[in-house]
């Protein structure tokens, strides 16, 4: 189908309704499979993570659409992103000729939409990591915040995203009139509040934050085995290579995603843990 109606059936985790959620699917054109697992953390608030994991037919091509949206101060913004970010990317007129600019424009446009709906969506925000797989051959990955995408090439982990941390983008924050706090026993925070330097939403901090994504491209060559997308609930307690080593041992990507989440819990991750594993090779 040449439309975006397919998004109405995308799975979601609704904040407060479930402590865990998992599933899987596969490409209709090849042996590429995916699985996901989302687990509520130990923090005293409802589940704030949403995801997209779906293969769709669009304009005569198959697209794999994968994303994790890690909310803070509520789940309204990640829920909005789940419904709107990919459609905003794909409705860009020049997507097929210039995916980089289309993704970048859509991130900024979606953030503006969220801010314009702030009376309904609240003062919270969300990080995001998104991946678009075109005909199982071309991969575009983008992110704002500290959710991360990692690929395995011949067993070697390669990070495709940039962790947007306040200390690494202090200059940009201070230029915009903000400051970075580094209190003992705590992580660096923008204006003493937010632990990431880029995010969707967060209207009260928006003048000091960026919402433009870092974007990377990769060809899916025969040595590419896996793509892992996960929220910082996983990456706070696990290195890139550790995650790849665990996922490579498990052929079923849903079981691999579950095992990664379980291992993060065993390492006493307190945050919500969301993970998607895309397997290119059996």
Image (tube, helix red, strand yellow):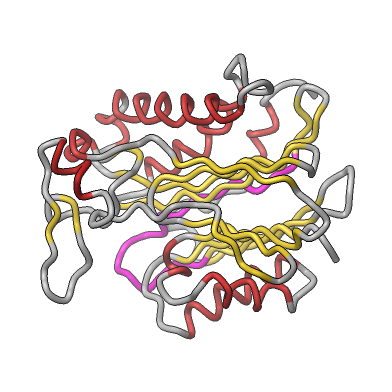
Quadrant location of the N terminus in the rendered image: top right
Q: What segment is highlighted magenta in the picture?
A: 39-55
Q: Is residue 23 visible?
A: no
Q: Compare residues 154 and 49 and report the one nearer the observer.
A: 154
177 vs 18: above or below: above
Question: Is residue 11 left or right of 107 when viewed as pictured?
Answer: right
- Quick one: which residue is furthest to the bottom in this view? 266
Quadrant in which the C terminus appears:
bottom right
* Number of dots carrying numbers: 0
Relative side of 174 to 202, left or right:
left
Q: Residue 116, image x and y in percent?
A: 30, 23
Indicate the quadrant where residue 223 lies. Answer: bottom right
Would residue 157 be visible to someone looking at this image? yes
Residue 134, x across and y down, in percent: 74, 37
Q: Quadrant of residue 233?
A: bottom left
Question: Is 23 colored magenta in this rendering?
Answer: no
Image quadrant assignment for residue 28: top right
Q: In the image, what residue occupies the spot 39% across and 35% down?
A: 212
Q: Residue at point 14% right, 54% down?
A: 180
Q: Residue at x 27, y 30 (%)?
A: 118
Is residue 41 rendered magenta in the image? yes
* Residue drawn at (64%, 59%) of the image: 151
- Percent of width and height locating residue 276: 62, 59
Relative to 35, residue 169 above or below: above
Image coords of residue 32 (percent x, y) = 81, 53
Q: Is residue 126 left or right of residue 189?
A: right
């Amino acid at each position: 189908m040449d439309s975006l109606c397919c998004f109405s059936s995308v799975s979601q985790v609704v904040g407060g309704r479930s402590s865990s959620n998992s599933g899987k699917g596969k490409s209709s054109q090849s042996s590429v499979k995916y699985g996901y697992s989302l687990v509520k953390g130990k923090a005293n608030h409802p589940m704030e993570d949403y995801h997209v994991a779906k293969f769709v037919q669009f304009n005569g091509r198959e697209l794999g659409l994968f994303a994790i949206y890690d909310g803070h101060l509520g789940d309204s913004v990640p829920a909005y992103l789940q419904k709107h970010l990919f459609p905003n990317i794909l409705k860009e007129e020049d997507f097929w000729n210039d995916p980089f600019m289309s993704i970048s424009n859509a991130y900024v446009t979606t953030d503006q939409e969220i801010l314009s709906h702030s009376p309904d969506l609240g003062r919270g925000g969300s990080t995001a990591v998104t991946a678009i797989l075109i005909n199982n051959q071309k991969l575009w990955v983008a992110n704002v915040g500290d959710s991360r995408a990692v690929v395995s090439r011949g067993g070697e982990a390669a990070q495709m995203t940039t962790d947007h941390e306040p200390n690494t983008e202090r200059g940009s924050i201070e230029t915009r009139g903000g400051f970075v706090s580094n209190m003992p026993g705590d992580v660096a925070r923008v204006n003493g509040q937010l632990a990431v330097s880029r995010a969707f939403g967060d209207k009260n901090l928006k003048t000091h934050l960026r919402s433009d994504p870092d974007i990377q491209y990769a060809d899916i060559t025969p040595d590419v085995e896996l793509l892992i997308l996960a929220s910082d609930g996983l990456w706070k307690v696990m290195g890139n290579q550790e995650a790849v080593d665990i996922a490579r041992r498990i052929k079923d990507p849903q079981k691999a995603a579950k095992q990664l989440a379980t291992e993060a819990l065993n390492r006493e991750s307190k945050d919500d843990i969301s993970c998607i594993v895309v397997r290119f090779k059996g």
